[in-house]
Image: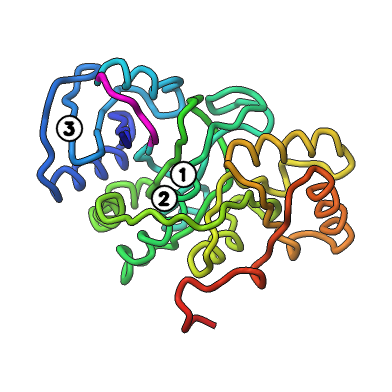
Amino acid sequence: MRLLVCSLEDNASVNIRDRILALADWTEQGTMEGSPVYYLKDMALITVPRLHLWNDNIDKAAARALGTSVEEVVFLSRHKAASGKRSLTVHPIGNWGRADYGGREGTVVPSAPHLMSSLLRQLKEEAAGLEFEITFEVTHHGPYLETPTLFIEIGSSEATWGDHDAAQAIARSLLNVEVSAYPVAMGIGGGHYAPRFSESSLFKKIDFGHMLPNHAFDLEDKEGLADKIRRGMEGSGASLAYIHRKSMKRSEATTLSELVRSMGYGTVDSSDLENIHPSDP
């Protein structure tokens, strides 16, 4: 079952929940943590009182409470950024280093590459005409779970968290998404918003799992970098790395590519990939 999680402390989360409940004929059955549980096809929607970052092992708690297995978890969330940029984002979770915002130090949560990339594409369709950027974010923050997990978010300020059209686009995406089965890659390089990986996933037959940005690794620390690559690959179920070469020096990209290959993984870039729509350039 796919578990959708709403937080009462997050007004964007409640906004998305209310829109998705209004768009389909959900069945209310039972409660969890004092709030109703809703079911639709292979999905269950729960509401918790805490902010998402502190919901460690909510997958196990929900499985026990609902008496069913949980295969994927989707947190309905706000995204906050100083820029206030209007954005709809999806991203995997975990910590490449310190656990300042939930989760466990140096631990990434299993990602859901096919669902996450498919939701990015569906968001692009459902949000057409809205003034929101559709983008991945790289792997960051908690909570800790053992089930494939992603966050889907409205960004990036109080002015947008209550936007009904944005919440409607996310709700429709969750209801209408058709999950792809393209090859899976771990993204390496770039910044927090991963525009290169977002663009590739929107137009190419590639699904992204974990994404390791430039600021989260040190090329001089080969052992530490190899450990992060290994964790990201295993947490994505990937055997390919997509290196954002333009975000680093050519020599750095070469060193990184050689390290990835020495670990037994392959590398891929946009020129290797088939277009989703043959008419695209």
Spatial CA span between label 2 and label 3:
26 Å
Q: Is residue 52 above or below residue 280?
A: above
Q: Are marks 3 and 1 in contact (CB under 8 Å)?
A: no
- Observer-side mark, 3 or 1, equals 3
* Residue that mark 2 sits on: 155
Which picture quadrant has residue 224?
Answer: top right
Residue at (40%, 48%) from the top-left corner? 157
Tell me which segment is drawn in magenta: 67-73
**Label 1 SS:** strand
For the residues labelled 3 and 1, the Cα–Cα distance comes to 28 Å
Q: Which mark is residue 38?
A: 3
Looking at the rendered structure, the kind of residue marked 2 is Gly
Which residue position is annotated with label 1? 80
For mark 2, does the 10 Å Cα neighbourhood hold few (<14), some (14 to 19), or many (20 or more) residues?
many
Asked if the stretch drawn in magenta spans residue 47, the answer is no
Q: Earlier in the sequence, mark 3 or mark 1?
A: 3
Q: Amino acid at mark 1?
A: Lys
Point out the image quarter for the N terminus. top left
Colouring mode (rainbow / by chain / secondary structure / one colour): rainbow
Front residue (pair 138, 178): 178
Q: Dot 3: within a 10 Å radius of its alpha carbon, few (fewer than 14), some, or many (20 or more) residues?
A: some
Residue 261, image x, y percentages: 80, 50
**Left or right: 78, with 101 as reference point:** left
Q: Secondary structure at mark 3?
A: strand
N-terminal label among 2 and 3: 3
Which residue is depicted at the point 84% across and 61% down?
249
Instruction: Name the residue at 72% across, 45% down.
Output: 215
Note whether 43 is above or below 66 in the view shown: below
Identify the amino acid type marked 3: Tyr
